[in-house]
Structure formats: structure tokens, C-alpha cells
Amino acid sequence: MALDDLKEVIEKLQGVIKAYHDDDDYLSKKEWRTRHALINPLLEALGWEVSNPAAVQIEYQVKTKRADYVLIREGEDKPIAVIEAKGLGNSLEDDETAQAHIYANQAGIDYMIVTDGDRWKMFKAYGRGTLEERQIMEFQLSNDVSHECALQALRMWSPNLASGSPKEAMPPVFDAPDDKMKADPAVPPKPALAIKKDFANTKELYLAYWTALKNHFEQRGKWNDDIKFRKPLQQCFMTFAVGHSGFHIHTWASRDKRYVNVGLTVKGAEGKSHFDRLKKSKTVIEREISPELEWEENPKENYIRLYLRNTDLEDGDDWKRQHQWLCEQLETFYEVFSEWIKAL
């Protein structure tokens, strides 16, 4: 398939998400609209003909329940992947992932995907290790650049997924011009485009960055053993449990927007009321953490974040400073918000 065509579709979807992300009703509360506006177009671009039941089946029967989508190899009846769909901005955490895993286990399906049309996560349904360790894809259209989303999404490309062992797509490599296309030796060649000389792509950069953060945290003599680092993944964030349902602390990094942050995510059935109660104590909380906290309300998840801006993730010499800041804020967020959450 043409990568440029997929990239063009993704850029259109990014525009839709930007236009409707803050609309409480249109996409977030109507899953079928999210399917039509965001999920179906990406599946179609990846070679899955949504209107063809031989390729994609909607509301697929799995015992007494129905899976939102299943993807089927050409010429076969058994699905290769199951998709759990949610409205834009809805949670993709444990409950949603568990539901897809149940479908995969009950129907003998090899791969499972969860998405709200913006965030996409894909897992091997079976194998060694935890489900988290079997995650093989994650991207977020509203946060990641279009070409990186396209490279990640190619895991779901019909021939790739139908192969039974979907491979990671690598950034294009351009060969030197042949004899007929050689440049004029009098004209200096343009420098080759590269993400970073030490990393094949942004995913490798994130994995190295979070692995180094984990090592920095462990080596600096952490005072709080309750902060548990999970296995670093090739994604732009890490999450940390705080011992209460509906809350977690996260670290986030953006290579292109040049920032890192630490934040508290507040979600779930009582997420809005919990966030409002915390916000009533905004002055006190900011006195305990920082007056530069940013409070962000969304239909399904709310965030309290602190940013370190103008950071260059590709500058390995600056990682120590960035990781020192992240570790200090992680400990502060955990100390402060653990007490506030208990009091809710």
C-alpha cells in the first residue's frame, strides 16, 4: 500500500478529532458515530473492507455477547483479530482491554485491538508474559505525528495482520540514485532526512528514554517504594498506580512538541465529581506542588499536569536533567495526591 495515502487519511482523521474532541455529545457519547467518523475510515485505508462481511463482521456473536468488530483472513471463516470500540475520549484501560481479551479467548482469536478512534492499542491475545508485555502497537492520532501513526498502524494492514505474525513497519530507507539520476558533483547534496542517528524511529527513542528514566529512578535511592515502574514500552507515556480505582499518575513525553510532563489522570464513573472536588482545593494543591499546574477537563478523563517545556528528547546529554525533574515530580505527585485521594 502507499504510505502517503495512509498518511493522508490519518491527517484527515486528526482534523476530525481536533474539531470534535471537546464536544461532549457528538462522538464521545455515541459510539456508532465514532465508528463511522474515525474507526471505519482507518480500517478501510488499511485494506479492511468494512462493508464486506467476508472481511469485517460487525457485532460478531461470541457466546452470549457481541464483539464490536472482527477482522477475517481472505478465504477463511475464523477471525484473526477482534476490536473493542469506544466513543471518542472514552477510557481504554483495564476494563475495556479485559473485554476484548474475553472475546479473543472465547472465540480463539489471535489478536485484539481496543480503540476510541483516537488511541489505538493492539495485543497478542496469547503467549508468555502479561497482557501488557504482549502489547505490540499503540499510537494516538491527536498526539503523534501522522507518519509515525501510519508506521504503527501498518501492524493492522490487511496482508500484514492476515500473515499471522504482523511485523513492525520501519521508516522508509531511500537508496542512492542510479547512474541516470546522479546529482551534479558541483552541487552539494542535500542532507539525508533522519529522526536521530542513534534510533531507527521514535518508538525506539521512547523505549530508550523510559528505560533510562526507570534506571535513574532506581539508582537515585528512591524514598517511596510504592511507586512501581512497569516494563517500559515503545510509547510516549508511562502510568503508575496510586492504589485507588479511577486514578493514576502518568509521565508523558513529546518528541515533536518538545515537552515532558507528570500528571494525575482522574477518570471513571465518579471522575468528574472527584476532579471538581480536587479543583475546589486548587490553591492548596498548587501550593504543595507548583502554581504552574495545568487543570484540563475532558468528557471521560481529566488531568492535572505539570510541564517541563523546551526539552529535546534526542539530546541524550540532557536526559539526566529531564529524568531528575521527572523523578522529583513523580515523588511529589505521589506524596501529595495519595493523601488528597484518600480524603475524597
Image (tube, grey):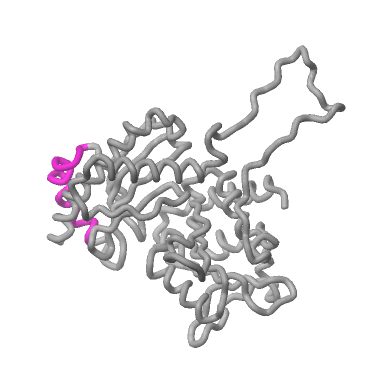
Q: Identify the residue shown where x is 31% and y is 65%.
A: 268
Viewer-nearest residue: 335 or 26? 335
Q: Identify the residue shown where x is 64% and y is 24%.
A: 191
Q: Residue furthest bottom?
A: 64
Horizontal side of residue 219 vs 278, given as left or right: right
Magenta residue span: 274-291
Horizontal and vertical percent position of residue 266: 28, 57
Does residue 146 appear anywhere in the picture? yes
Does residue 27 appear anywhere in the picture? no
Horizontal and vertical percent position of residue 201: 55, 41
Q: Please state, as top left, top right, bottom left or bottom right, where the C terminus lies in the image.
A: bottom left
Q: Looking at the image, is 115 positioned above or below residue 311? A: below
The quadrant holding residue 97 is: bottom left
Horizontal side of residue 221 vs 252, given as left or right: left
Viewer-nearest residue: 344 or 126? 126
Horizontal and vertical percent position of residue 177: 79, 30
Q: Identify the residue shown where x is 44% and y is 36%.
A: 257
Q: What is the total number of numbered labels drawn onto the structure image?
A: 0
Q: Residue furthest top?
A: 186
Q: Identify the residue shown where x is 57% and y is 52%.
A: 152
Horizontal and vertical percent position of residue 314: 46, 33
Q: Looking at the image, is 154 positioned above or below residue 94? A: above
Horizontal side of residue 155 vs 313, given as left or right: right
Q: Is residue 306 within the magenta segment?
A: no
Q: Main secondary structure of the magenta part?
A: helix
The quadrant holding residue 166 is: bottom right
The quadrant holding residue 324 is: top left
Q: Is residue 278 within the magenta segment?
A: yes
